[in-house]
Image (cartoon, grey):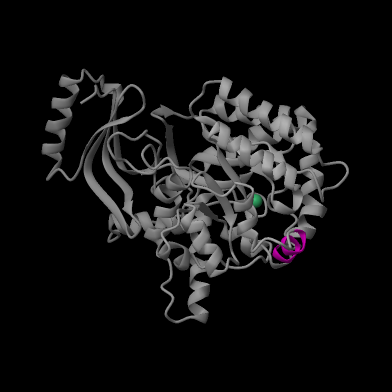
């Protein structure tokens, strides 16, 4: 075993499979110097046994006292993974909730995104959004930036300085966009290449570029083709939108009359593979779902956004049955709330809404929503061997949750079990319950 440099003792809660949340009381997790989990021992019979083991480890590994964290009645959970968020749109979060997707883009979203050519404006919004995400326990985030290379790089720098794990995408759009917010095909491709190289040259393993065609209607065939090539050449992840809204689907049909479906459009341009994250996927046909599954493409489920923009309700159960990689996304600011806790709650409600129509539909449980927010997300970004839970060998991306913190929305009663308290946190908790945050073993200020 590698040397333990920091040891956490107390209750550890994480998912190991979709339906199973492990609640490990009287447990120990040891972190090595690279921020990797090198030791996990759970369920000591009593506190004496636990303390004996702490003493033994602290001598063996020369762990100083200040590096032994007694979590008391708090508990440890993995960091949340937001698989779909638009950083610039954070400026508008909580406003502009009165229009469906295409009108919403035109009236609220394109105007604010176009302002990010101004780096001062960008710095203000990007500092705030990264901070807000961290405050809400999001240790990994897939961000869309804007079409501007400098501002997109600034977002990468801010996330990097704050220690967040992030995929940053310079948005690409060379048609059907307003005059004040559009690129030429050539600029879009050159700028994306330049952006990818700049991000990779920083050498921060936590910050990765992600190829980001906004969605098929705003990219020409030439651009889609070029981005497919670039993503394959650089082996980056790809993110885009798919089948969010019925008008959008009709539009894509009219733009690509020769291609079988919206999903096939991305496949046609080599943008649908095991490194692709497609947001929404609300209205996919059986054939399209089958293609997603076959291509091992991931889906980011964004229920807050889907309800707010009246897009529709994804049948999560249908997606899970096909063994498609599925995670949760805030979709800021189509989704008005930056917290993955809120997304979990809405994912359960969204699943319940299917039960209203189909009595056979098995609604999502809170344990399953927690899995999607953590392990599910790690699979979406192809990092299930690195993050998502506390298995030995993974990076320590973690939140210490304090259900007893004063002035929070949780009241704990005498007979509440740890599972009850955990469930109360999932349904009622917020950023006030976050006591400490770690990314790759490093304590993060938020
Ligand atoms: Zn989106």
Residue at the image position 74 percent from the left and 54 percent from the top: 217
Viewer can see residue 74: yes
Q: In this view, does 62 lie to the left or right of 226?
A: left
Residue at the image position 16 percent from the left and 20 percent from the top: 59
Viewer can see residue 144: no
Q: Is residue 146 left or right of residue 318?
A: right
Residue 308 coordinates in the image, percent (x, y) = 66, 62
Residue 386 coordinates in the image, percent (x, y) = 38, 37
Q: In this view, does 156 lie to the left or right of 58?
A: right
Task: State which region is magenta.
Answer: 249-255
Q: 414 or 428: nearer the eye?
A: 428
Residue at the farthest right position: 179
Q: Is residue 416 part of the magenta span, yes or no?
A: no
Residue 398 coordinates in the image, percent (x, y) = 39, 38
Q: 39 or 204: nearer the eye?
A: 204
Q: In this view, does 71 lie to the left or right of 339?
A: left
260 vs 118: above or below: below
**Quarter of the image where the N terminus is located:** top left
Residue 164 coordinates in the image, percent (x, y) = 51, 32
Residue at the image position 69 percent from the left and 53 percent from the top: 94
Q: Quadrant of residue 317?
A: bottom left
Residue at the image position 42 percent from the left and 35 percent from the top: 436
Q: Is the magenta stretch mostly helix, strand or loop?
A: helix
Q: 427 or 282: nearer the eye?
A: 282
363 vs 169: above or below: below
């Amino acid at each position: 075993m590698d040397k333990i440099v920091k040891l956490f003792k107390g209750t550890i809660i994480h998912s190991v499979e979709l339906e199973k949340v492990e609640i490990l009381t009287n447990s120990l997790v040891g972190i090595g110097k690279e921020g990797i989990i090198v030791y996990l021992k759970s369920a000591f019979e009593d506190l004496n046994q636990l303390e004996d083991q702490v003493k033994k480890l602290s001598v063996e590994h020369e762990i100083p006292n200040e590096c032994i964290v007694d979590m008391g009645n708090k508990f440890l959970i993995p960091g949340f993974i937001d698989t779909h968020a638009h950083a610039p749109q954070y400026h508008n979060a909580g406003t502009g909730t009165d229009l469906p997707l295409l009108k919403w883009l035109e009236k609220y979203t394109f105007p604010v995104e176009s302002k990010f050519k101004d780096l001062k404006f960008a710095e203000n919004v990007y500092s705030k959004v990264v901070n807000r995400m961290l405050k809400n326990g999001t240790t990994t985030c897939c961000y869309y930036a804007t079409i501007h290379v400098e501002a997109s790089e600034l977002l990468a720098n801010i996330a990097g300085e704050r220690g967040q794990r992030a995929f940053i995408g310079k948005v690409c759009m060379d048609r059907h966009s307003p005059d004040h917010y559009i690129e030429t095909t050539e600029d879009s491709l050159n700028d994306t290449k330049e952006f990818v190289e700049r991000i990779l040259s920083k050498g921060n393993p936590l910050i990765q570029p992600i190829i980001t065609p906004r969605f098929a209607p705003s990219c020409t065939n030439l651009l889609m083709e070029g981005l497919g090539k670039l993503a394959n050449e650089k082996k980056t992840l790809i993110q885009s939108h798919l089948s969010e809204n019925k008008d959008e689907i009709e539009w894509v049909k009219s733009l690509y009359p020769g291609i079988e479906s919206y999903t096939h459009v991305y496949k046609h341009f080599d943008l649908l593979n095991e490194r692709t994250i497609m947001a929404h996927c609300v209205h996919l046909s059986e054939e399209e779902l089958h293609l997603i599954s076959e291509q091992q493409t991931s889906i980011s489920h964004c229920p807050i956004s889907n309800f707010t923009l009246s897009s529709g309700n994804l049948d999560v159960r249908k997606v899970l049955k096909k063994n498609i990689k599925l995670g949760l996304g805030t979709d800021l600011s189509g989704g008005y709330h930056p917290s993955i806790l809120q997304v979990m709650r809405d994912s359960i409600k969204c699943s319940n809404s299917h039960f209203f129509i189909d009595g056979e539909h098995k609604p999502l449980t809170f344990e399953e929503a927690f899995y999607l927010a953590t392990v599910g997300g790690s699979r979406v970004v192809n990092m299930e061997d690195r993050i998502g839970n506390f298995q030995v060998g993974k990076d320590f991306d973690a939140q210490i949750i304090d259900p007893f913190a004063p002035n929070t929305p949780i009241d704990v009663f005498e007979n509440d079990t740890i599972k009850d308290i955990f469930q109360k946190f999932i349904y009622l908790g917020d950023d006030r319950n976050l006591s400490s945050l770690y990314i790759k073993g490093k304590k993060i200020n938020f």
